[in-house]
Amino acid sequence: MPSTGLALTPGLASFLKSLKTNPIDTSIENLISCALTPFLLWATCPGQTFPSNHNHLRIDCSNAAKSAIPGHALPQRQRWPAPHSCSAAGDGGGNIVRRVLGLIRDEAEDDHEAEFSLNASLPLDRDALGLRQDGQDRNAVRPPLTSMFSLLSHPEPENSQPSTPGSQSPSGRFPSHGPSKDVRAEVLEGINEIIDELGQVDEQIAAYALDHIHSNEIILTHTSSSTVQKFLLKAAAKRKFTVIHAESFPNNHDSTHATVSGKSLGDDDQLSTDAFQKPLIQLGITVILIPDSAVFALMSRVNKVILGTHSVLANGGLVAAAGTRVIARAAKVHQTPVVVVSGVYKLSPVYPFDFESLIEYGDASKVLPYEDGDLVEKIDVQNPIYDYVPAELVDLYITNLGGHAPSYLYRIVSDHYRKEDISF
Amino acid sequence: MASTESLAETGAKPFDIVAAYNELLRTDPDLTMPIAAIEALVLLLTHEPSSTISETLDLLAKSTDHLKKAIPNPIGLSAGTDLFQRYLITTLQRPGQLGPAGDFKAIRTHLLSNGRLFIRRAKESREKIVAFGRGFIRDGCTVLTNGGSRAVASLLQKAADEEGGPSAVRFRVIYVLSSTSNNPAEASGEPEGIETVRALRAKGVPVSTIPESAVAYALGKTDMVIVGAEGVVENGGIVSRMGTYQIGLLAKAIGKPFYVVAESHKFVRLYPLGQYDLPIEQHVIDFKSEEDIAEENQHKPSSDRPVLPLCDSVDFTPPHLISALITDSGVLTPSAVSEELIKIWF
């Protein structure tokens, strides 16, 4: 399974660096492998100016949306870079793409408040999606007018047209000189900030470890998530506790074994050793490796379950490695608190309408090797990679912003993403 | 009543806000209670000349009290009156053209001249709900619903689209028809929601109607429950047509998602602690012995509050039974409601 939260973020950073130094052509290969392509291209290419040409930006955005669909641009890549964190199979959305989009919108609106509104100038097929964007909605996004007041408020565009084609209204023409350079720099800076955030996310989360892990506790965890490992390591520096590690067969057991034993895995895994220098056992922590099937039996002794995740959805549910739901359910039965550690970048604004579609299926030969040809022909082998864990099975989320109840996540979602970017 | 007296003093011909409210609801079946209340207040302001801020606010407060006392179920309308009042106060406090420095007349004219606009926006908010809620209804799913909510009806009808239309979703509906909702006021005597059933069937959606007693039986064949609401209270629970609470309980027990469709102007600042904590007089549970019945036949007991007829009775569905609220400001968790309310009140 794609162990999310691995040390892939430096890849993104170095990629941007290489873009700055190298000519575009040489790194185009890299570019294609990243969903941020259009934005980085736009942000770093010297030839293009923003917002001189809205149509251009629109193309960028729609390209982004297209290339963000996993099967579209990257047919062969199973392992999506963690920061991208596709919220769901087929929803075609990357959280980072959404954030960069939001960033561009914010900058554009800040700088040209009076002159134009990016909202309206970027239709992004919103009409097709049925998400009409009128004065009210824009109102709802911005303080101080709240969404509840939107019914009564807004004395300015009273001219009963849903979209006001007035003087402040946009359209493709906009002076190509002047502040356009600044916006570009601002957006570049914003992207760099996001990259910084991605680089620090695990450390920031780990800073909360001592609040949640106490001496002599028994902690159960699952998969080789580096976020969880750093969290535990941080606590292990000060306190002694016991870790029970479920091995998460068949998709992640190799790297889980490597995590527990402290041996780095081969090149095929991007889990670099510098991500965590010492395994927990070297810090004197008792680590017990168990098969997934033993989780329920041991749960009665466990004080706390700490889980990593693939992505977190807007309703507080999460999509995590297969087997997570079993653990969360077992914890519920035993009234054991379940803590999920996740960077804010894994938070997806997508509402899980259809849980089934969120679950990807992986290589069946991991369950039953193809060498057992006879058997493979006769039975249907499935290897689901993810589990959907409903919000009521989770007690606490710890992100780089702190601890949140699952019901509060909607708030963080609305802080980080623009409404109009939720569905591309 | 004190408020009516004061109204009589201010104008030669007192404006009857209760009559205006009822008239608005009667003439436009698409109008929700909060919007009718806002409209009634706008009409009040046009009839009653008031030039100062405090005079206007006082007038509004008095009329609102009067209206709430006169209507048996004031939950829906109090959402509207509260929203109106808060809007007025917030706009006056905020710097700007309509603020304290600006002209009070400007905001007054804005409100008076835009009565129709508010109604239109309120109806548009239903379209927004449809846009947010459409993803919930998928091909092949079965939806259980109840009551006569217009928001639910428009969501289902939009999903059905025209038969064979490009965006038509093939889904089925189980419609719970209430046995007690044979409204005597309605000439046909048909249960609430039958028009929606007809409209859906006309669009080619297979609809099954079941009595309330069959909900538990039918939930096994259901993928999700979608209900409307009269008011969404502060903790995220809903006040809705009698019978919604039990559907919520059953859906939770059987493990089906329970969604509520409601416009955000129905959010009301109310924190009911249980079924019997609503500011409504409704005699659903009415213990009687033979003696009481005989006594009642002789003289009707008069109450200071109008009693809600049994067909209009409501119950309270607590937030833990609700999976999500589909509103015009997005798909919210129940706990998001309090934040929306806090934003306008504090």
Image (spheres, coloured by chain):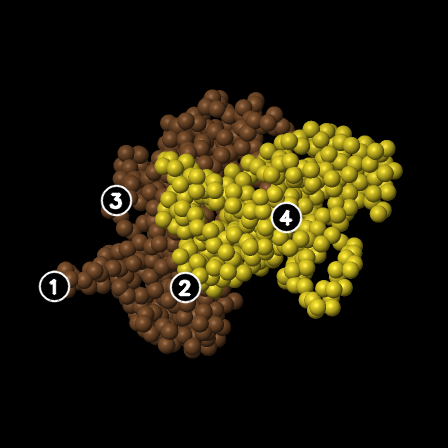
Chain colours: A brown, B yellow
1 vs 2, front mark: 1
3 vs 1, front mark: 1
Apparent side of residue A4 relative to residue B126 in the rendered image (left or right) = left
First in sequence: mark 1 or mark 2? 2
Q: Which residue is mark 3?
A: A75
Q: Nearer the viewer, residue B15 or B82?
A: B15
Q: Pointer 2 indicates a residue of which chain? A: A
- Amino acid at circle 1: Asp
Spatial CA distance of label 4 from label 1 is 72 Å
- Amino acid at circle 4: Pro
Q: Callout 4 environment at 10 Å: few (<14), some (14 to 19), or many (20+)?
A: few
- Marks 1 and 2 share the same chain: yes
- Marks 2 and 4 share the same chain: no
Tags 4 and 1 touching, CB below 8 Å: no
Looking at the rendering, which quadrant does residue A365 occupy? bottom left
**The residue tagged with tag 3: helix, strand or loop?**
loop
Spatial CA distance of label 1 from label 2 is 37 Å
- Amino acid at circle 3: Pro
Q: Which residue is mark 2?
A: A307
Q: Nearer the viewer, residue A4 or A333?
A: A333
**The residue tagged with tag 4: helix, strand or loop?**
loop
Res. B17 visible in picture = yes
Spatial CA distance of label 2 from label 4 is 57 Å
2 vs 4, front mark: 4
**The residue tagged with tag 1: helix, strand or loop?**
helix
**The residue tagged with tag 2: helix, strand or loop?**
strand
Q: Pointer 3 indicates a residue of which chain? A: A
Q: Which residue is mark 1?
A: A374
Q: Which residue is mark 4?
A: B184
Examine the rendered structure and indicate whether residue B202 appears above or below residue A9: above
Q: Callout 2 environment at 10 Å: few (<14), some (14 to 19), or many (20+)?
A: many
User: Measuring 74% from the left and 68% from the top, which residue is drawn there?
Assistant: B291
